[in-house]
Amino acid sequence: KQEVTQIPAALSVPEGENLVLNCSFTDSAIYNLQWFRQDPGKGLTSLLLIQSSQREQTSGRLNASLDKSSGRSTLYIAASQPGDSATYLCAVSPQATDGLTFGKGTHLIIQP
Amino acid sequence: GAGVSQSPSNKVTEKGKDVELRCDPISGHTALYWYRQSLGQGLEFLIYFQGNSAPDKSGLPSDRFSAERTGGSVSTLTIQRTQQEDSAVYLCASSQAGTSGLTPGDTQYFGPGTRLTVL
């Protein structure tokens, strides 16, 4: 059974810092990996999707990498802002149409 | 365009009652997913639909849970004889996966969720 672990569980940093969130998964037979953010009381917003054949994806200040063979992904956030404060979730899928297996998330606080 | 919508946003019910939760996916999305997020727990996958068919129902927690989708669009998740442990936020997502097979067709877009409280 696939298990997804996210480290750290919580992180608080001053505004402007660059930071890295980590995600690991036990079964490397994945189809894709997605990073989401969840704001309190709201649904999930997709940030980046990396197909299993890809190494990284970038969107603005966000960069996600994937090392499928070692079962790891990282989300890099550059020049953090208070608006980046949220819970960040990593999720993997074994097939294109399968449900996602989520980690428990990293609760990120950016201090103004 | 409009995103995934869910109704109701909040539902409070008494133990033993039946509830229906509704999900309206993004127009044109053939794949639809239901998840549950319990307090202090991670997101748990329940079921997905490709068109009107649900190939895999093994994620449903018990036989009190059922889901259907009609016309390849709206889906309802029904919980019969609700229990207190059913209290959670139920999230719905949709994607184009299975239609184009192209990135970002696989991206799942989530609705705001239905918060269910069973007293």
Image (cartoon, helix red, strand yellow):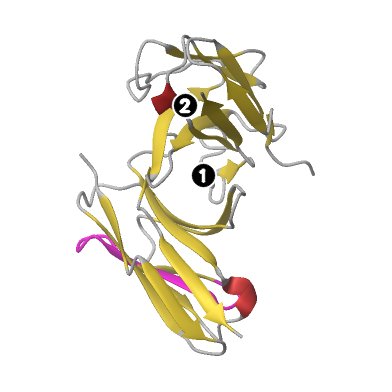
**At which x and y percent is residue B101?**
51, 40
Q: Which range is magenta?
A: A59-73
A65 falls in the magenta region? yes
Labelled disc at residue B78:
none
Amino acid identity at mark 2 = Tyr
Above or below, comparing residue B85 to residue B18 in the picture: below
Residue at horizontal 56 percent and vertical 70 percent from the top: A85
Amino acid identity at mark 1 = Asp
Which callout, 1 or 2, points to the residue nearer the camera?
A: 2
Q: Is residue B25 visible?
A: no
Residue B39: image quadrant is top left
Q: Is residue A111 visible?
A: yes
- Marks 1/2: CA–CA distance: 13 Å
A49 falls in the magenta region? no
**At which x and y percent is residue A20?**
39, 77
Pointer 1 residue: B106
Pointer 2 residue: B48
